[in-house]
Image (cartoon, helix red, strand yellow):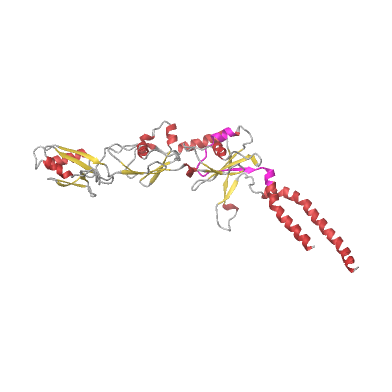
Amino acid sequence: MNVLKQAKRFMPRCAFDMRRVGILIAMLPVCVTMSACGVAPGMRMQQPATLPVSTSSASTDDDRLQVPIADINLALITRLREDARKASLDWTGLTRAHGAYTVGAGDVLQITVWDHPELAAALGTQSQSSARAADAPPGFVVDQDGTLQFPFVGRIQVAGLQPEKIQMILVKALSKSYQSPQVTVRIASFRAKQVFIEGEVHAPGSQQINDIPMTLYDAIGRAGGLASTADQSRIALVRDGVQHEINLTEMTARGESPSHIVLQNGDVLRVPARDESGVFIMGEVNKPLSAVPMKSGKLTLSDALSQAGSLNSASADAAQLYVIRGGEGKEPQVFHLDATSPVAMVLANQFDLQPKDIVYVDGNGLVRFSRVLSLLLPAINAGLTAAIVTK
């Protein structure tokens, strides 16, 4: 009897608590719906977007960088292309030839004094069986100090001189020992000047500069040509500590020949891979990835979306497509495209992306609500279970 009395006293209170829990559960979807847009992952960007510029914990609203969102349209595309054209490299300093070849340290000279075979022994002999690729051919090697030792002449300074000038010096010096000597001077091996080619070519390494000026095409051809993974739009030429970016595709489109670019001694030519200039595709696409530019180095917004398998028709909000730009040392920019209309893809096909751009596609309202609900339901179930166990 005592047990029944206690149960009757407990039942009204338990029923009241369960009714209160039921009211909370009924109100939960309404609260979640009202707050979903504010806390859902992938929230829409506002005008203007803000980015923090201070890492201090005491930073205030004044320490935030304003990044306006620009709509992608024909006017914007025209302006961006014009800015890229103005920023293109002036090739004037790279297209000048630097005169005839001059002898340097390490070059091998072939010097012939006609009607005096006894001087031919000074050239030395080298059997073909023992010859190695690194060995100098028979001849007179210019020492590291730029001097040359020749019989009956002694040591003379030849570095920085053309073969014709060296010939005149030898004729004058040999005239003291021979009557009207006939001298021929030619370069047997060019070893003093070279350029270095690395990256996406078939045979990277050093290439020797000879008496014919080496152009950009000559250097690439000697290296076996560009590999299929090469980015032709961002070839880097490092000269005297300064890097010049060469866009072969743009030069050809403007009617300029890359063969006019003449390389100099010590130049470093680097051909980057296309995957180094990738663009990140994120959000509601069928295959998030890093999109790789074409062989020409170009990559439009439509090309990138195509590589990502296009927008996810079930979860993407086509009206919320963004391009975030702002690498190291660059001013952050955000571009927006409303892709709900098929006409918008014409703009996407003309909008050129840059390396390390981020293409982000936001989710639609139903997806956002579903994600918030999936985050809250475990906590709700845990709370109900705890309440029931407690009672």
Q: Quadrant of residue 248?
A: top left
At 15% from the left and 44% from the top, the residue drawn is 121
Magenta region, residue range? 345-368
Count of marks placed on residues: 0
Residue 93 appears in the figure: no
At 58% from the left and 56% from the top, the residue drawn is 59
Outermost residue to the bottom:
2
The N terminus - image quarter = bottom right
At 57% from the left and 47% from the top, the residue drawn is 66
Q: Position of residue 326 (x, y in %)?
A: 52, 45
Q: Is residue 15 above or below residue 305?
A: below
Does residue 350 belong to the magenta stretch?
yes
Outermost residue to the right:
1
Residue 78 placement, left or right of 130: right
At 52% from the left and 34% from the top, the residue drawn is 78
Residue 361 appears in the figure: yes
Q: Nearer the viewer, residue 3 or 357?
A: 3
Outermost residue to the front:
129
The C terminus - image quarter = bottom right
Q: Position of residue 23 (x, y in %)?
A: 80, 53
Outermost residue to the top:
255
Does residue 226 belong to the magenta stretch?
no
Residue 128 placement, left or right of 54: left
Q: Position of residue 92 (x, y in %)?
A: 37, 37
Q: Position of residue 172 (x, y in %)?
A: 13, 40
